[in-house]
């Protein structure tokens, strides 16, 4: 009570001093009449720092992911980023400053999420990983961001030389399928988390999207330091800290509010063939997705993370690939032949992944390098890709698209029902759930699993309806 009284006296004295000061101030001959004329004017105040959601998400860290900072840091920032994005470049100084201000407590983990419309982002990502094979990921990281407008193949080789890499090893590593697979794994992780766009950061599992101001990041880091310290006080070791911090985290961000409705269901069933084509998933499936695709089409590549996630989340789904190289894509037909020939040696999906990861590099020499990387019998592969059998198979599949109204790519048929374009995961998942329910109903009536697709499509159309 005594303290409160004292505090009240101080306030009173301050008010008296303020009043005295105002009394002695010269009269405002201009401002006062203007204020009387305009009325009270609200004073703008700087808005408070934006609150960052406290939800925690479980974000895994692959053993191959490049990191900066102590492995047992109290705060781990996992960043999904890419090298052609100006916002990612803008984000880089923020990450550096965080490391400078919290050197013992902050760890940065880089994961790749090259966007499909940045045509040099995938090659840059693979180049960074290849540099990491020689212990120079972060040196290449800096060079790529400093030269984001110089990411052509020749530029990347020059960058590698500039940071002292072995040129021969670097060139060989650029073609390694396992390095391209790391990029895809990171993209799948981002897709699974619902982390759309770049840069996206997870600070001890807390989501922060975009190149936000440094103070916003520092605010979250300080909050997470307090959370980490509280957990350490319970006996958790620093080595186990990150796992403990995210162990009960959510698996995925909430889906964004849609700005457009889901595509309407076309309930027409088409009798789409699945024989003599590569497939993934179970041989006998409740749901069969037939994809008509083109290796030079960027939209076909963009939809791959959604399809990969569908196969993971719905083990009863089978994905069948059928060729539709579009005539205005000059390298699509040779690429289709290269994939068909790889299929003859049991390496279709490996070639599929390399072609889509390098859809801007589909010249004959490129195709042969991919075949060599996959360890194919090159003589047999060359003979197969240029054979009459390959041409007939691809032409026959392309001709099917006219019958089913699937002229564009990618076009999908989910148990015979059409879905057009590079749709988001949620749209595929909706269709798959409904198709699974229909299949379950048939199985309950005694239809064997192996016969489900044929039964559903038995009466399907083989010709497109007239408009």
Image: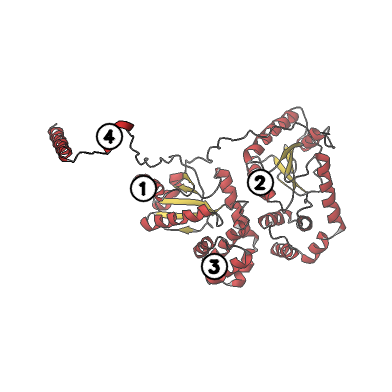
* Mark pair 2, 3: CA separation: 32 Å
Q: Earlier in the sequence, mark 2 or mark 1?
A: 1
Q: Mark 3 or 4, which is nearer the eye?
A: 4
State whether residue 21 is above or below residue 141.
Answer: above
Q: Secondary structure at mark 4?
A: helix
Q: Earlier in the sequence, mark 1 or mark 3?
A: 3
Question: Which image quarter holds the N terminus?
Answer: top left
Judging depth in this view, the residue of 211 and 274 nearest the camera is: 211
Which mark is on residue 303? 2
Q: Secondary structure at mark 1?
A: helix
* Mark pair 3, 4: CA separation: 73 Å
Residue 80 in percent (x, y) is at 52, 51
* Mark pair 2, 1: CA separation: 38 Å
* Mark pair 1, 3: CA separation: 34 Å
Q: Secondary structure at mark 2?
A: loop
Q: Which residue is mark 3?
A: 134
Residue 174 in percent (x, y) is at 62, 64
Q: Which residue is mark 1?
A: 222
Q: Earlier in the sequence, mark 2 or mark 3?
A: 3
Residue 90 in percent (x, y) is at 48, 54
State whether residue 124 is above or below residue 393.
Answer: below
Q: Earlier in the sequence, mark 3 or mark 4?
A: 4
Q: Residues within 10 Å of mark 3 (few under 14, many from 20)?
A: some
Q: Are marks 1 and 3 in contact (CB under 8 Å)?
A: no
Residue 61 can be seen, yes or no: no
* Mark pair 1, 4: CA separation: 48 Å
Q: Residues within 10 Å of mark 2 (few under 14, many from 20)?
A: some
* Mark pair 2, 4: CA separation: 66 Å
Q: Residues within 10 Å of mark 1 (few under 14, many from 20)?
A: few
């Amino acid at each position: 009570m005594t303290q409160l009284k004292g505090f009240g006296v101080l306030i009173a004295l301050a008010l008296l001093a303020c009043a005295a000061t105002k009394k002695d101030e010269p009269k405002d001959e201009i401002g006062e009449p203007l204020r009387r004329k305009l009325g009270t004017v609200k004073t703008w105040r700087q808005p408070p720092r934006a609150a960052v959601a406290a939800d925690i998400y479980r974000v895994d860290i692959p053993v191959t992911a490049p990191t900066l900072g102590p492995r047992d840091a109290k705060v781990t920032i996992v960043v999904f980023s890419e090298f052609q994005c100006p916002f990612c470049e803008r984000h880089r100084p923020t990450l550096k400053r965080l490391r400078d201000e919290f050197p013992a407590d902050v760890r940065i983990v880089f994961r790749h999420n090259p966007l499909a419309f940045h045509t040099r982002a995938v090659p840059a990502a693979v180049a960074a990983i290849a540099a990491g094979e020689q212990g120079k990921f972060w040196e290449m990281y800096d060079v790529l961001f400093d030269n984001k407008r110089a990411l052509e193949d020749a530029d990347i080789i020059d960058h590698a030389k500039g940071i002292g890499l072995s040129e021969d090893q670097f060139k060989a590593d650029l073609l390694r399928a396992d390095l391209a697979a790391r990029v895809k794994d990171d993209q799948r992780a981002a897709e699974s988390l619902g982390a759309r766009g770049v840069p996206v950061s997870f600070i001890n599992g807390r989501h922060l999207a975009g190149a936000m101001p440094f103070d916003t990041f520092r605010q979250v880091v300080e909050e997470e330091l307090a959370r980490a310290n509280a957990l350490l006080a319970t006996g958790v070791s620093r080595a186990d800290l990150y796992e403990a911090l995210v162990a009960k985290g959510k698996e995925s961000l909430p889906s964004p509010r849609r700005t457009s409705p889901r595509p309407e269901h076309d309930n027409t069933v088409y009798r789409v063939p699945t024989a003599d084509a590569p497939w993934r998933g179970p041989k006998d499936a409740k749901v069969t997705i037939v994809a008509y695709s083109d290796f030079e089409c960027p939209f076909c590549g963009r939809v791959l993370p959604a399809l990969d996630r569908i196969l993971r989340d719905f083990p009863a789904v089978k994905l069948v690939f059928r060729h539709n190289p579009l005539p205005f894509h000059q390298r699509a037909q040779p690429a289709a032949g290269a994939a068909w020939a790889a299929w003859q040696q049991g390496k279709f999906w490996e070639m599929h992944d390399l072609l889509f990861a390098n859809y801007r590099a589909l010249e004959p020499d490129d195709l042969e390098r991919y075949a060599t990387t996959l360890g194919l019998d090159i003589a047999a592969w060359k003979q197969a890709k240029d054979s009459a059998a390959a041409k007939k198979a691809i032409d026959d599949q392309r001709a099917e698209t006219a019958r089913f109204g699937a002229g564009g790519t990618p076009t999908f048929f989910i148990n015979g029902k059409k879905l057009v374009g590079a749709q988001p995961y949620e749209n595929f998942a909706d269709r798959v759930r409904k198709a699974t329910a229909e299949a379950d109903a048939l199985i309950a009536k005694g239809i064997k699993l192996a016969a489900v697709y044929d039964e559903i499509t038995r009466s399907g159309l083989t010709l497109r309806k007239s408009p």
